[in-house]
Image (spheres, helix red, strand yellow):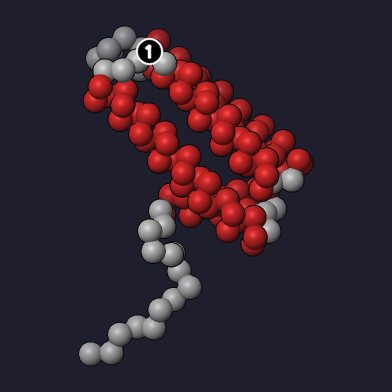
Amino acid sequence: MPTAPPTAGPQKGSDPLIERRVQYLAKELGLSADQQTRLQPLLLAQRQQLQLLREQRTTGGRRQGTAQDLKAAQAKSDEQLKIVLTPAQYAKFAAMRDEQRDKMRERRAAGAAQPAGQPE
């Protein structure tokens, strides 16, 4: 039975969510192919770090220091992104991120305002 030739698709160990994120950012920020290549491992590392922090919080009951850990991880990620992105691209990225955070806060506030078990 013949096998299909290798394609130029996702690399071994790649994450489909990260690939979609890179494609989205490429479109929104006008990233070059080199920037896309350099951005993918940064976003993957960021995602893994956030997952680790989440796991520590949920499995260990650890809440103290979580906000500081998140801020430190964000600062590290921002410094790495500033190396890959141009100043204009980073400014747009930061604005997009802030807008997304605002939307998330609004959804959380709306959800918290609803009494449990009550229809909207």
Q: How many numbered discs, if any?
A: 1
At 76% from the left and 40% from the top, the residue drawn is: 87
At 47% from the left and 25% from the top, the residue drawn is: 70
Instruction: Classify 115 as above or below 107.
Output: above
Name the one closer to the observer, 9 or 112. Answer: 9
State the image coordinates of residue 98 (x, y, percent, origin top left). 61, 28
Describe residue 105's horizontal placement relative to residue 118 as left or right.
right
Instruction: Classify 112 as above or below 98.
Output: above
Name the one closer to the observer, 30 or 68. Answer: 68
Image quadrant occupied by the C terminus: top left
At 48% from the left and 73% from the top, the residue drawn is: 8
Asked if residue 100 can be seen in this view, the reply is: no
State the image coordinates of residue 20 (x, y, percent, origin top left). 49, 52
Instruction: Classify 55 as above or below 31.
Output: above
Describe residue 120's horizontal placement relative to residue 94 as left or right.
left
Which amino acid type is marked by label 1? Gln
Question: Which residue lies most toward the right here?
Answer: 88
State the image coordinates of residue 104 (x, y, percent, origin top left). 49, 25
At 43% from the left and 65% from the top, the residue drawn is: 11
Describe residue 82's horizontal placement relative to residue 71 as left or right.
right
Asked if residue 34 can be seen in this view, the reply is: yes
Q: Quadrant of residue 62?
A: top left
Answer few, some or many: residues within 10 Å of disc 1's Cα (few below 14, many 20 plus, some between 14 and 19).
Answer: few
Instruction: Look at mark 1 in the image and give the residue it sits on.
Output: 64
Image quadrant occupied by the N terminus: bottom left
Question: Tag 1, which secondary structure?
Answer: loop
State the image coordinates of residue 7 (x, y, percent, origin top left). 44, 76
